[in-house]
């Protein structure tokens, strides 16, 4: 690993300013679980790291506001989010998902903001957050910004964030009637990188599904909503035939990519089956 300078700004805005105009020789670092590994492998060779560990306390907290919206500071660890009573109340699917996200050693160090900004399509939280209609807000060198998590990713390890734009907060809206589930297929163990992830969030009017969102990850180069599958489910009374149509629509729509976790054909077949399973799992939630 090449030598580097460590900069420790006291505010997120100052951290953004330290990243401005520096090119590929500078990187921000929060928990460091991804950045340090990539530096050890020689993928990244920054001359300067801008640490976010001393920024304002507000970026480490987890709380709800008056209408139940969940606010998660970008510097909160995945472990603190996993064990947060606020998260469990607003979106218990987040708590369930985190129980098998990597391992406890990683979750104790990795941060929410770093997890989202890293943009590895195999990560578990992004598809869940997209299904929940979550957004992220943050700062750049001069101002503030906010966008839906659905619009954050552009490709493998790629986001829309400019070099000086840093995530400050994750915002998850509360909906009392919402049910959600996330299922993943791993080839070796429960906390391994998945070959496929499917997140579903929906409301139900009796036996009729309303407001459904279906998101695929790991089998694609970024977490992606499946509009055709959503149309097959919206307003339908769920039965085996409806779920089969939704699975077929998802398999036809998704741009599947092969990797070491499985071939494109294998992942497409997984998607065809897992969409129905995820819908059933969401409907089973109280």
Image (tube, helix red, strand yellow):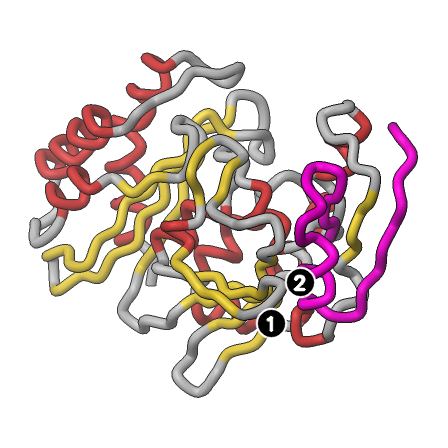
Q: Position of residue 147 (x, y in %)?
A: 41, 60
Visible in this render: residue 26?
yes
Q: Is residue 125 above or below residue 122?
A: below
Q: Which residue is mark 2?
A: 76
Q: Tell me the tag on residue 62.
A: 1
For the residues bearing labels 1 and 2, Cβ distance under 8 angstroms: yes
Secondary structure, mark 2, is loop
Q: Position of residue 94 (x, y in %)?
A: 49, 56
Q: Is residue 141 left or right of residue 91?
A: right
Secondary structure, mark 1, is strand
Read off the magenta span.
Answer: 1-30
- Name the one closer to the observer, 45 or 184: 45
Q: Residues within 10 Å of mark 1 (few under 14, many from 20)?
A: many
- Name the one closer to the observer, 243 or 12: 12
Q: Residue at x 72, y 49 (%)?
A: 28
Q: Residue at x 30, y 25 (%)?
A: 255
Magenta stretch: residue 204 in it?
A: no
């Amino acid at each position: 690993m090449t030598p580097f300078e460590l900069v420790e700004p006291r505010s997120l805005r100052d951290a953004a300013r330290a990243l401005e105009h520096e090119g590929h020789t500078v990187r921000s670092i929060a928990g460091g679980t991804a950045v340090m590994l990539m530096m050890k492998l020689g993928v990244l060779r920054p001359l300067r790291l801008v640490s976010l560990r001393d920024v304002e306390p507000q970026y480490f907290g987890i709380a709800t506001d008056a209408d139940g919206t969940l606010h998660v500071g970008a510097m909160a660890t995945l472990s603190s989010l996993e064990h947060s009573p606020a998260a469990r109340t607003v979106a218990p699917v987040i708590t369930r998902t985190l129980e098998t996200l990597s391992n406890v050693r990683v979750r104790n160090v990795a941060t929410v903001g770093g997890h989202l900004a890293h943009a590895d399509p195999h990560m578990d939280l992004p598809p869940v957050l997209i299904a929940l209609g979550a957004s992220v807000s943050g700062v750049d060198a001069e101002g503030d910004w906010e966008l839906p998590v659905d619009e954050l990713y552009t490709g493998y390890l790629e986001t829309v964030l400019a070099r000086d734009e840093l995530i400050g907060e994750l915002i998850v809206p509360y909906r009392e009637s919402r049910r959600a589930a996330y299922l993943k297929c791993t080839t070796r163990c429960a906390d391994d990188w998945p070959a496929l992830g499917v997140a579903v969030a929906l409301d139900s009017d009796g036996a009729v599904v309303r407001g459904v969102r279906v998101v695929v990850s790991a089998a694609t180069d970024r977490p992606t909503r499946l509009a055709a599958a959503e149309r097959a489910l919206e307003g339908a009374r769920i039965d085996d035939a409806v779920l089969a149509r939704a699975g077929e629509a998802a398999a036809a729509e998704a741009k599947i990519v092969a990797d070491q976790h499985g071939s494109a054909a294998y992942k497409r077949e997984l998607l065809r089956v897992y969409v129905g399973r995820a819908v059933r799992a969401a409907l089973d939630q109280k």
